[in-house]
Every structure is written in C-alpha cells, then in structure tokens.
Image: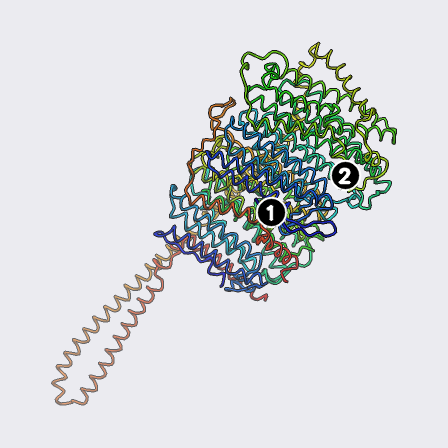
Amino acid sequence: MFAAVPEPVFALNNIYYTSLPLWITLVPIIAGIGIYFLKDHWEIPRKVLAFLASLAALIGVVFLFPLSLTGTVSYDLIDFMQLGLFFKLDIIGWVFAFLITLVWFLATIFSFAYMDFEHNRRRYYSFLIFTLGATLGVVMSGDFFTLFLFFEMMTLSSFVLVIHEQDIQAMKAGILYLYLGIFGGLALLFAIMMLYGATGSVAITPALELLGSQRTAIFICFLIGFGIKAGLVPLHIWLPQAHPVAPSPASALLSGIMIKIGAYGILRVAVILYSSESGSPGIADLSYLFIIGNVLMWIGIVTMFAGASMALLQTNMKRILAYSSVSQIGYIATGIGVATFAGVEGGMGFAGAIYHIINHAFFKAGLFMMVGTIYIYTHELELPRLGGMFKKMPLVGVTFLVAAFGIAGIPGFNGYPSKTLIHDSLLIYYKDYGLLSIDLAEKIFVLTSALTICYFIKLFRGVFLGPVPEKLDREYSLPFSVNFVLGLFALIITGIGIFPNLILERVLVPAAELLNYEGYAMDHLNHFNFFEWYPVKAMVIVVILALLIYVPAAYRGWFNWKPPWWLSIHALVYNPVTHLLLDLTCRSGVLIDSSVDTAYDKSGAAARKMCSYLGSLDSGIDKFYEQSGKTARKLADRSTDMDAKLDDFYEQTGKMARKVADRSTEMDSALNEAYLKTGRAAKKLAEQTSNAERKLDSVYDKAGSKARQEMERRLSEKKGKRGFFDPSKWSTKNLSFDTLLLVLVLGIVLLVIFYFGRAN
Amino acid sequence: MTPVIMYSCRVSDLFRNTLSIVTAAITFILTLSLYGFVVGGGEIQLTLFEVLPNLEISMRLDLLSFCLAALASFVWLLCTIYSVDYMAKEHACGRYYPVFIFTLGSCQGIFFAGDLFSLFVFFELMSLIAYILVIHEETEEALKAGYKYLVMTIIGGLALFFGMIIVFELGGTVSLGVGVILQEPSMLALLAFICFLIGFGMKAGMFPLHVWLPDAHPVAPSPASALLSGIMLKTGAYGLIRVIFHVFSPEMLQSVGWNNILAVLAVITILLGSAVALTQTDIKRRLAYSSISQLGYVLLGLSILNNNAITGAVFHIFSHALMKSILFLAAGAIIWKTGLRVIADLKGIGRQMPVTMGCFSVAALAMIGIPPLNGFLSKWTLAMGALDAQMPLYVLVLLVSSLLNALYYLPIIIPAFFEMPGDNGHDHHDHHEFEFNIQEATPRMLSVMIILALFTFIFGLTPNNIAFSLSRVTAEFLLLGGAF
C-alpha cells in the first residue's frame, strides 16, 4: 500500500515535510469507497482490503513516531478548496493517531468474527474504513479548517455505523446523533470563522492575545462543538442512545476513539489555542485562563459524576458502558481543565488527561468488544437475563475482569496511573491555590471513582456470576480472532498498568515539554513513582468507599431504581427547548409568509375594489358619453332633416332646371324646325343670295351652340351640387364614437407634440 | 464571436428534440469560446440599434456576463437533455421546447445586455415567456400559480421601468458600460434604488416579494423548475449586481447606508425561507422555499459589499445553480418514475432509485455546507466577507440557516436510504438486508444528474477551481468599478 512506501524526508529545523500524513488519511478513505463497490458476496476480498487498509494506516503512523518525537511532521496542499489542507503532526497528535490506528486495527479484526452474524456487511466495512481515514485526518490536521473538514466527514460516516441495525431505536438514536453532530459542527464552524476573523488564520497555534473581546464566545462555541462529540454533560444525550445500538465493534470505536476526538479538540483549544505566544501570559490573561479552566474542570466533574450515577441505574450492558464513557470523559475534561487554569504549572493535569485518553481507549474498546462477544452468542443485552457466563466463556470473563480493574483504577492495571495523575494534580493545585472548589472537586472525584467500581461490580456480577439462564446453557466456542483481540487488549491493559512510567517518560513528558510546561508539576511528573504508598493509599480509600456504597445499596436494590422520565435531561431541557425553538422558527416563519401572502391577496382584493370603483366611474363617464352621443345623434338627425330639406330644395331646383332645359330643348327643336323651314325657304333663296345665307347659317349655329353650352353648364352645375352635399357620405351618423375618440386622442397628441416641439 | 447569435431562436417541430439540444449546445460552446477573451480582460460593447436618442438595444460582455452566461447555458444544455426523456410522458411538447429554448435566448440576452433598457427588454421577455413554462400542466393550480407569477412579474417590470426612467432622467444614459451613472444620493436616486430592488428582488424571490415563487416553481415541469430556480432567479441577482455596481457605486451605497435595506431583507429572506421550508410536505415546495433562502445568501453577500462577500455571492450563484438543479431534477425523476411527491411517501426510495437519491444527497449535503462540497466554500467565503465587515451576526444567520437546511434535507435523505417503505413503527427483523429493487430513471436523466453532482465536487474540491477563481476575479473587477 501507499502508506508503507517511505517518502523522502527532509529535515528542516525539526519540521519534517512528508506527504505521509496525507496518505495515511487517504488510504483508508479510498479503500472505504472501494469496498463499497465490491460485490456483495465477495467476502474475502472485502475483509482483506479492510485489513490491509487499517494495517497500512497503523504502519504509517508507527513510521512517523521518531519524526514526531523529535519535531513536527507537516504537509500541506495549498490549493485544496481554496483554503489549503494542512497536515501537522506533533507528539500529541501522534499519540492520538497511534491510538486510533491500533484500536481500529483490532476492531477491524474483531469485526471479521462479529459481523458474520450481521447483515449489510459491505456497507459496514466500507464506512468503518472510511471513518478511520476521517478520524485520522482530524488528529493529524494542522489547522482548524482541515480539522473541521475531517470532523464533519467523521460525523457523517459514523452515522451510518450507528444506524446499522436500522430498527426504530437505532434510527431514533442515529438521527439524534446526526442532528447534534451537525449542530456541533456548525458551532465549531462558527468558532473557526470567528477565530479567522479575529486572527486572520485558522492555525492551531497559541493565540490568546490575538483573540480580543470575542474570546469567550469563541471558546464557548468550540466547547459546544467538541463537547457534543465528547459527550460532556449537558450535551451528552446522544451518547447513551447511539453507542448501544451500533454493532459492538463500532460502539467500541465510538466510545473508545471517537469521543476522544472531542476531547482532543478541547485539548487543542484549551491548552494550545488559549495559551500565550510568548509562553507567559499577562496577569489579566492568567485570571481569564483560570476562569475558563475552572469552568472546564467543573464541567468535567459534573460529567463524571452524572455519568457514573446514571451508569449505576442501567440494566443494559451497553448502556452501562456508554454512561461509563460519559463518566470517563469527565475525568479527561477535568484533567484538561486543571491543565488550563494552572498555566505553565499545568503539566500534571495535561499528562493525566492524555494518559487517561490512552487508557480509556484500550479498556473501553476492549469492554465493548467483550460485551459484543457475549451479545453475538446470546443475543441478550439485559443484565437480568444474563448470568454465569464466566463458566461458559472463561477467556471473556478474565479479560473483562482485567479491563474492569483497569477502568476502576486498581493498581497494576492501566486506569490506575492516569487516574492517579489527575487526582494528584487536583491535590497539588489545592495545595497551591487553597480553593474550596478544587477541594470539593477532589472529593467528588473520589466518590465517582468509587461509583465506577460499584457499577462494574454490578455489571460483572450480572453477566458472569450467578446461575446460567436455561436458554443460554450451551457450549460456546470463540473464533481465534476474537480470542486474539480480547487477549491483546488484556495484555495491553496489564502491560501499561505494570510499567506505567514507560508511557509517561517516553510520550507524555516530551508532549508536556513541547507545550512549555515547567515548574514543580513537571519535576513531580519526571520522578513520579506510581507504586509509592501515598498514591496507592488513595486508591485503597476509593475501593473501601466503593464497597461501603455497593454492599448496602445492592442489598436494598437501589440500583434497580428507574428514574422517572420527567427527571431526565431530555424531558427537562432538550425536548422543551427544541420544541420551543422549532415551533418558534416554523410558526413565525409560516406566519410571516402567510401574512405576506394574505397581504398580497388583500391588496389584490383592494385593488380589485378600486378597479370596480373606477369601473363605475368609467361607466358613469361612459353614460355621459352615451348621452352626449345621443344628443349628438339628435343633432345629427336634425341636421339630416335639414339636409333632406336642402335635398328637396335642390331636387326642386333641379326639376325646375330640367323644365327650363326641356323648355329650351323644345324651343331649340322648334327653332330647329323653324330654321329647317326657313332653310328650305332659304335654299330657295340660296341660289339667289348664297353669301347672305352662309352668314345667317353661321349666326344660327353660334346661337345653337351657345344654348347647348348653357344647358350643359346648368346640368353640370346641378350634378356638382348634388355631389358636394351627398348626405349618405357626409353624415355624422356614420362617424362612430371610436373614431371620434381616436381623433380626439390624436389631436391631443399632436397638440402635445406641437407644444413640446415649440418648447424645444 | 458576437453574442448576438446566442439569443437567436431556432425552432422546428420535426426534429425539435435534437434541435433543442443542438441549439443549447451551440449556445454553450459559443459562450465558452468567449472564455479566453474575457479572462484576458476584454470587454465588448456593441450597439445594435437606437430606439430613441440615448436609448438603444446594445450588447455588452464582461467577466460577470460571461460567468453567468456560461453557467446558464451549461445548466440549460443539461436540462434540455433531461427534458427529452422527462417530457416524453408529457403533453404539449410542441409548445414546451420552443419556449424552453426561447427562454434560454432571452436569459442570455439579460446576461449580455449592454444597458438597462435592453436588460429590461430581455428581462420582461424572459419573464413573460417563462409563464408558459410555469403553466405547462394547465391544471387549475398551475394556472393560479401562473397568474400570481404573471401579476408579480408585471409589478416588478413596472417598478423596473420606473427605476430606469429615473436613472435616465438623472444620468442621461442607461448604459452599463460607462461606469457609475448616479454619483450623488438624492431622493430620486433612492426611489430608483427601491424600484430596482422591487423589480429584481421580485425575480430573485426576495422577501416580501417571494410569494409567487413557492407556488410557481413546484407546478412547472421539473426541468423547467430546475431552471426557474437554478438560473432564472439568478437574473434578479444579476440585475442587482449590475445596478449596484454600474448605476450606483458601492462606496455611495455604503456611505448612505442603502445597502442596509438589502441586508435586512436578505436576512429575513434567509431565515424565513428556511423556516417555512421546514414545514412543507411537498418535496418540490420544500425545494422552492429552500431556493428563497439560498437566494437570500446571494443578496446578503451583495449587501455586504466587500471583496470576500461579493466573491461568495457570485460563487454561491454558481453553487446554488448546480445544487438546486440537481435537487429539482432528482425530485423530478422521482415524480416521473413513481408519481410520489409527498416527503413522507419517499421512504426507501433510495433503494429503488439509488443513483438519483445519491445525487440528491450530494446536493443536499452541499446545501448544508459539508466541507468537500461547493456549498461549504460559498458559505465560508460569505462568512469571511461578513466578518471582514465586522458583522458576526450575519455569520450566525448563515449557520442557523445551515442548521435548518440540515433539518429539512436530512428527513428526506435518511428515510430514503435507511427506512423501509411502509415502515410504521414496528421492527422488521426479517428484511434487514438491503433490497435494491432498482427502478431507475433513464440513463440520460441519470447522466445529467451525475454530471451536475460531479461538478459540485469539482467546484468544491479541486485546487484549480475555475468557478471560484472566476468569482474572485469578478468581484475584484466589480469593486474596481468595472475596469481593470
């Protein structure tokens, strides 16, 4: 695989540029996508690919150890999404990366056995490996943008793991997980944007002085964003629902690894971002840090106590473990809080927090897988219906016991050193500051540790001791892969427990030194001996306290008390708040929207009313015009009468003219006759007087033509008079009203044009 | 090379499908061919003819026109291809295709308009023609929605016309190529600004002028609603950009604070759109309300008026066009195939149409703003702009709206993939296995959606992001007053 191929490494002031981090994240992501496209029944290639991908990531991370120990590994893709993808891996990140890959590798192997009993394996492996890549991306990112990108990818892809069962419960839990995840993501995004706005960069570097007045808001947003993922107390509600419903290897990863990503984020923000660039913050900043550290510590204390007491009241194995995870995250948050408020003296708290993250990953992932092993063989998660499994599955029983000792903090197992460190840091700072709050926190810490032991006694008794239920009374044979994984977890847990100083010196002290921790706490840390009487004594007190609580409580059956629904944080806070908010936004939105709509409708109606009013006005005008039209018609009629009279008159004159013409024609013909007669007489005379005759002839001719001209003139005169006054053509009757208007408008337009033309 | 060819409309009934595609393709290619020219900083100003003295139909080409025209013709091309299969089941194709292509032409005309007058002409042309697309179904509902659309369009058009007259009166020209027309704020200028706001805001679905949108978009055929939402809304935003930068100037608007009008309206639009979308049960109505809120982002970016915000706004035009087209096309494919359009009925649809729903999911995730997708980038840039302007409140608005986006998109996606159809509250242990009962849309429809979905990745993920760098350059270009 790619990751196994070593890239050329250039050492430059202890900053190593290598693309290895990119490949470590990309290989699982690509492999995960690849698995999804394998065919459903290709079991072996799928498993091989998943195995190889997680192994490759593990090897890659191991390879980075020497580099990250001596300096920082970094790599950037400048142009990615215009903002640049920036990988940076220091020793803190490396611890996380190693933890992730190792636990993931083991969980993948465990899945091979576990998932054979499950459906939809293709989707499961695909998203399992994809999530590995995204999770690695989070811890290897060098700036908050890259971190956010992988954080969101992790949330979305792990959603598919949570809802794997797809029953109602899983869907409900998954949807809650997703919504809270997205809400957290957006809070994170807001914080990142504000950070960018304030400092101009998204790098994870000390920037306390640059943050200015918005630093509290930014911190709260970061805390919400990462706190949801980590499961800090007011934000933990998704965790006890989502972790139990996922398939066991996935719950192991969710509980063991993914909530640590939240813790990792808080760590980065509280310890690195909110620290001074020069290493020694001013007085004002110190007191500010003291406040936020205290807040964080108290959130942690409340979380650990609430988680532990809720775990005590559960009967579902996986729910106990889920609440236990909440409680353990409280320890981690307390450690971080202590590290924050103590400033440069915070080495103890810091080391304790990281140490506990490491340990919790191992024992909680181990515990989930053990419970998962029991579940796949018995299909039973409820304590009352289980029992006597120690005889049936001795190996699971032994490893479970080891892991339980680890989480309880028994000396010799891995929970002990980390709890001791956190506890000691509380003691030390109580000594330094003498504050009541720290003292109180320390008391609650001890009490919670005792409760932790109590619920593990309850869990162990319920599952492994007592009589075997009849239904489950058969032989079980575990496959090698399960035995191997569980055995390895037990081995790691005891290994760390017996040699606690190994990790402390090799990893935690360099990490603390990287952050410029100094002073008494660091000296103390450097020469810490976990097996002195003084820390062991504290643990002995815890165990005695636990027994004091457990024995009477179990005797009286207090642990079976079910808290009523109205007492839960769902009923008290979340449901009312979400309902209120949703109602508020939706109702007001719909209200505004519909009111705008009705406003338009109403304005439309008003406009229509106005129009109808205008219409009546219009019809009034219309009537007026009609009447005026009528009068005009009357006028026109009258004029027509007049016209007709005129016509008559002209006709009469015409007749008269015709009579005149007739008469003249008669006269003419009479004349003609007379002339003819005289002509005949004249013919007779012609011979005698031809000259006189011709003259006479021409005279009469002239007179005749004159008369004809006269007649023609009269006729044409009459015709012309008739044409000009033709009533059928020139009557207002035919001038329709439209034309009149048209003409009017035209006239106005012309007038206007004329007027404006003149004005120009 | 002249953009004039692009709005010439060629229509034939016989080979109309092929011809429509070819026309759209030619338009797209021609537009793309302008790329080299535009990136070199070139501008074309071309006067076609004068209607009145100083009032002409003219063409203009600069970076912003190119961006939007390329985007429009690209989405149009894909939608045309999609239509071929989608409309095969529908009536009145002979009316649909010519109108479809004609609208493309007028849309390109808007983007290439060289002055307010021609912008107005093309704007009205597009709006009126699109009416035919809206009422395509000719049901009572469609006609009613269409009527509402028409009335609003006409109101908007008149407001626009009035604004234009004022600008002409005050400045003596309406050309977009001469830089800032109105230098000094005055009552009339404010009136003109409000008129433009009404005219273009109506098209962009700005509160309180959005009422036509949730009615009109769902009733249109899906490829048409994709375009209505994806592209035609953007013409409103485009018009506002032009008005803000070429008629007024950003400095002037900021100095008198008129941009605050736009900002307040944009904030209301964003929140209102998202909140109301949450209550919708019809998938296309939900998408339509989502469009309202997304356009609010663009308007918000415009109102902030700094480099990042403008870049974000222009880039969001790109991303929203892609995302919303996918969403509408996918919803269309589902309706086309199954006839289901109520969200509660869509359980298990992801198993029946995995590719369609896959594309839908990608687009929805981009809408929510999940990082590797383009929606995140535009939100990020807008938020940076808001922070540059010292307004963290706007960032909060953006994020609240993102959360609401998640709240209304995820209940579509999750049941689609992870619940069984008819799953009413009891466990189904017997059919846990994924039963892919695949009844997909046709390959042509799928390929269109896949191409668009790939682009949401490309515009989000790749280092050489053409769309983003174009938006960046465009923002700089605009802020420098339209000259390099």
Chain at tag 2: A
User: Where is the C terminus of chain B found, in terms of image quarters?
Assistant: bottom right
Chain at tag 1: A
Secondary structure found at label 1 = loop
Res. A232 in view: no
Looking at the picture, the colour scheme in use is rainbow
Coordinates of residue B370 in the picture (x, y in percent): 60, 41
Residue at image location 55% in from the left, 26% down from the top? A479
Coordinates of residue B298 in the picture (x, y in percent): 61, 47
- Residue A275 in the image: above or below residue A679: above
Looking at the image, residue A455 sits to the left or right of residue A727; the answer is right
Lower sequence index among marks 1 and 2: 1
Q: Are marks 1 and 2 on the same chain?
A: yes
Give the farthest residue toward the top.
A556
Looking at the image, residue B136 sits to the left or right of residue A226; the answer is left
Q: Residues within 10 Å of mark 1 (few under 14, many from 20)?
A: few
Res. A356 in view: yes
Of circles 1 and 2, the one toward us is 1
Q: Which mark is residue A621?
A: none
Q: Front-most of A660 and B429?
A: B429
- Residue B30 in the image: above or below residue A473: below
Give how far apart the Cα atoms at labels 1 and 2 are: 34 Å
Residue at image location 81% in from the left, 22% down from the top? A537
Q: Which mark is residue A5?
A: 1
Q: Which mark is residue A271?
A: 2
Contact between marks 1 and 2 (CB within 8 A): the answer is no
